[in-house]
Amino acid sequence: MEFHRHHIISMKDFTRDEIDYILDRAGKLESLARSGRSDILEGKILALLFYEPSTRTRMSFETAMLRLGGNVLNMGSKDTSSVIKGETLADTIRVISTYSDTIVLRHTSEGAAQMAMEFSSVPVINGGDGAGHHPTQTLLDLYTIKRESRLEHPDIAIVGDLKYGRTVHSLTYALSLYGANITFVSPQQLKMPDQIIDDLKARGAHVNETEDLDHVLNNIDVLYMTRIQKERFPDPTEYKKVANAYKITNKQLVHVRPNMIIMHPLPRINEIDSSVDNTDHARYFQQSFYGVPIRMALLTIVMGADI
Amino acid sequence: MNDHHELRVRPIVNGTVIDHVLAGQAINVLRILGITGVSDAVVSMVMNVPSITLGHKDIVKIENRELEEKEVDKISLISPSASINIIRDFEVVDKYHVEMPSIVEGMVKCTNPNCISNTNEPVTSKFVVRTDPIRLRCLYCEHVISEKIAEYLL
């Protein structure tokens, strides 16, 4: 199929065919993502504008661009840029889009990437907007499930902060396109918003909710753990109360399906005990790596490069 | 225009009659039109009068003023049943039902305090409008407003 998308803002923009196209392209680029360098994006410049801290998203975009033979401009910390002088995001985008061929934006406000798109003369890729979307994370999650488990009708449990976690909202939408059987596991105060549950059910997704992780652990293909995000809590005492609510150790894995995989968008705090790292179930480090071929695929698509 | 409730206020010479306003929304219509206690506009308002189609309704009459498109769009968001009658020399020269636009721009404030449209960025709020029931979805952050829309009108 032909797929020339100019901006990558929200997973809701994508059809199932478009997602499959990206995952296929990432598959073709995976060996290059592991080592080497090509000239696919030679002469192109990627600008990274990160208004919030990031390690994996920022560095995997840099790696992706370098593997493709392109160059990277990094705005650096907002404290050392014109942002501290009060420049609007709109003005920053107008300027940076004249310096670069594509912009990756992470911002604290929801809708920032959507707005940036209106002011940019080059493609904008959303690297996370507040509690909103993080489409490249979702795509690498899907790629991980495809590579390490099965993407068609998987049984998946998503655990932890489902209320404030931006990654899980986009992920559940995308999983619904693949007929996933999804169980949401969270404490009551962090449960998936009703609006999203309703949307998923309206799309025909199979959705269950529980507070008890052990209830589902032995009947799933994918266990998707998330961090309880301290910065999303208005009230620190509420954070402390639920921070240790869900933790997985290797002792809980005795009766799980042999091929069950454990994922996590990282960074983890203590949701996954280090005793799990060396089991056959752990996939979170591979998952982080898969961000590179996915982002390589997206960069080649938005800049119109053949591979 | 011959309903018995018309007797409650006298006909106007020139201006606009906003009829079939959802009962209780007339005050919000005045707010939309910027009519406050300190303005010199001549305004008549009746509330909760019987209506065949709505059960009860409000009516607002404003003398010597015809509404702008944006004002009519805002009224449609709080009272989709409303009809607009333009009066010139005691005659109804135009009558139409309000129509809800599919997108409203710069009319409603997003309820999400962390939305980019609530910052100092040079953007106006934009919402996609869905009906039955009315739901406004922010084009930027996707937050949905489904009730008390009048409170968020700009």
Image: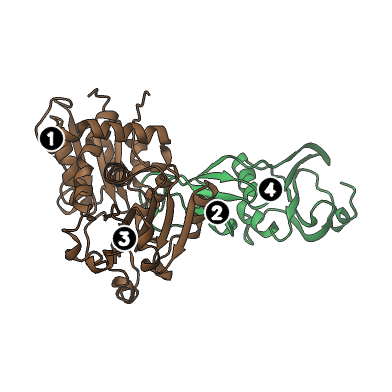
Q: Residues within 10 Å of mark 3 (few under 14, many from 20)?
A: some
- Both marks 4 and 2 on one chain: yes
Callout 4 environment at 10 Å: few (<14), some (14 to 19), or many (20+)?
some
Is residue A211 in sight in this rendering? yes
Label 1 sits on a secondary structure element that is helix
- Mark 2 and 1 residues: CB-CB less than 8 Å, in contact? no
Identify the residue position indicated by label 3 in the image: A256
Let me know if residue A123 appears in the view: no
Question: Disc 4 residue type?
Answer: Pro
Find the distance from the CA under tag 4 to the CA under tag 3: 55 Å
Task: Check the residue under mark 4 and report the chain it is in.
Answer: B
Q: Nearer the viewer, mark 4 or mark 1?
A: 1
Which amino acid type corresponds to the residue marked 3 in the rendered image?
Val
Which mark, by number, is residue B153? 2
The residue where tag 4 is placed is B80
Q: Amino acid at mark 1?
A: Leu
